[in-house]
Amino acid sequence: MAKPWVNSAQRIGSDLHLELSGAGGRRAALIDALREAVRGGRLTPGTRLPPYRSLAADLGVARNTVADAYAELVAEGWLTARQGSGTHVAERAEPLRPRHARVPVRTPPRVRGPRHDLRQGTPDASTFPRAAWLASYRRALQQAPNEVFGPGDPAGRVELREALTEYLARARGVRTEPGRIVICSGFAHALRLLSRTPVLRGTLAVEAYGLPFHRELLADAGVRTVPLPLDEHGADVGRLTRERAVLLTPAHQFPTGGPLHAERRAAVVGWARARGGVVLEDDYDGEFRYDRKPVGAVQGLDPERVIFVGSASKSLSPALRLGWMVLPERYVDDVLAVKGEREAWVSVLDQLSLADFLSSGSYDRHVRRMRQRYRSRRDRLVAALAEHAPHIEVTGVAAGLHAVLRLPPGTERSAVKAATWAGIALDGLAEFRHPEASRTRMPGHDGLVVGYATPSEHAYGAALDALCRALPPETPETP
Ligand SMILES: Cc1ncc(COP(=O)(O)O)c(C=O)c1O
């Protein structure tokens, strides 16, 4: 059966790149362009071509030019024409096969996602503020001077660095100026860049629990990480010894969930001053605090001793790949030098959109709305557990997009297995433990990390029910 002409005539002119150029006149040029489109497979056998009049209008040629070109290609066998049903690409006009066509292309098997996705890491993807982002994008594009479309600045657009300077001071207590901010594509990118500078050369102290992806990235870059024990006050920074740098998540320890205690915040800055060291502050979800005002950045205590890194991955979307580094002045040139070539930069239009999104107040509005939504999700999680699994302690719930359910020692693996059987995707705390922390028997806990932001609103209730059913029952006290 003939395929309908699904593309508009406009699209044949642009998508199929019908370039009517050449010395032989417009008719010959159109014949060549159409023949090439069929031969190359852009017009597949059976496709109905647009009527003479519409293609002629789109290409700015006379109607007869199109009629003559179609007639010529019918005569050559590329096209067929039937009274009353228009002109089609001939069935026997075989498109040129791509060079590797003989290698069978295997479609990847369709991986069915879990029925209930409670993995940490992703904000509710259905809440991306499409309309507000589009408005910012449009304004940014309309107002951008022409030089935006030329070679850029490795530090990133100044408009974004100015907007971040204001926002980070107001929302996170960060003390900086645009000249000390370098735009990157997120925390992972910042780590990659810093690991190529003298800043992270050698050994880096990290929290005993953290994102394995970051540890692996550092290991690949030749940076050795050593774990710092964690307790109820956060990382035990008093154990810092010969290291020159320490990576911390002070606002909301990842993944165990508490803030770094005020005394430890002061202590780690004191350590950095005394040792000539540096604190790398990962502020991945600092805006999402539910019990009081967000805990300010450690960077505010000493901008010359702390590198602050923020990201839009939790507040907006990890797909945007937008982040920012706030650097002590002495590191700015080193970071810009390694950023160097253009492939390590972030799209200028995305940067300008985020600048507008911040300065127009859209970012604040979105974060406020999401904070309310995640707080209500957290409250539902806490209430469901109180009702159906009161023997399980929930921790790390004052902030962020995930909670930790504490489990009795030795039960984590079976609890993760039970959740998997129930169609729930989540991780155990052990996933995040530094291998050396296990080897040296650093204190640790059994627990489940539950991301309550990931499911969409309508799926959340069912995910909670499934979780409560899958949790281990209370074990009777042994006398
Ligand atoms: C601990 C931690 N740091 C940082 C990030 C942000 O990473 P990125 O900005 O590379 O997406 C995440 C994930 O969103 C995270 O879990």
Image: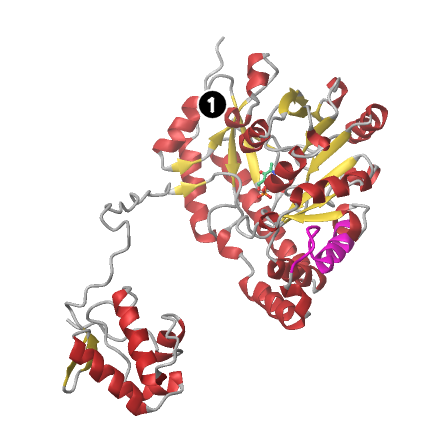
Question: What residue does disc 1 label?
Answer: 412
As drawn, 339 above or below 393: below
Asked which quadrant contains residue 212, the reply is top right
Foreground: 96 or 123?
96
Q: Position of residue 327 (x, y in %)?
A: 76, 42
Element under label 1?
helix
Q: Position of residue 344 (x, y in %)?
A: 60, 47
Residue 165 lies in the magenta stretch: yes
- Mark 1 neighbour density, 10 Å: few (under 14) some (14–19) many (20 or more): many
Q: Identify residue type, mark 1.
A: Glu
As drawn, 171 above or below 79: above
Asked which quadrant contains residue 221, the reply is top right
Q: Is residue 95 visible?
A: yes
| Magenta region, main secondary structure | helix
Residue 388 lies in the magenta stretch: no
As drawn, 326 above or below 438: below
Ligand 1 position by quadrant: top right
**From the viewer's perspective, is 128 left or right of 74?**
right
The N terminus lies in quadrant: bottom left
> Which residues are the magenta region?
151-169
**Residue drawn at (63%, 36%) of the image:** 191
| Numbered-mark total | 1
Asked which quadrant contains residue 333, the reply is top right
Please, which residue is most extreme toward the front here? Answer: 23
Q: Position of residue 479 (x, y in %)?
A: 49, 8
**From the viewer's perspective, is 94 left or right of 457?**
left
Q: Position of residue 110 (x, y in %)?
A: 30, 45
**From the viewer's perspective, is 155 left or right of 452?**
right
Foreground: 389 or 338?
338
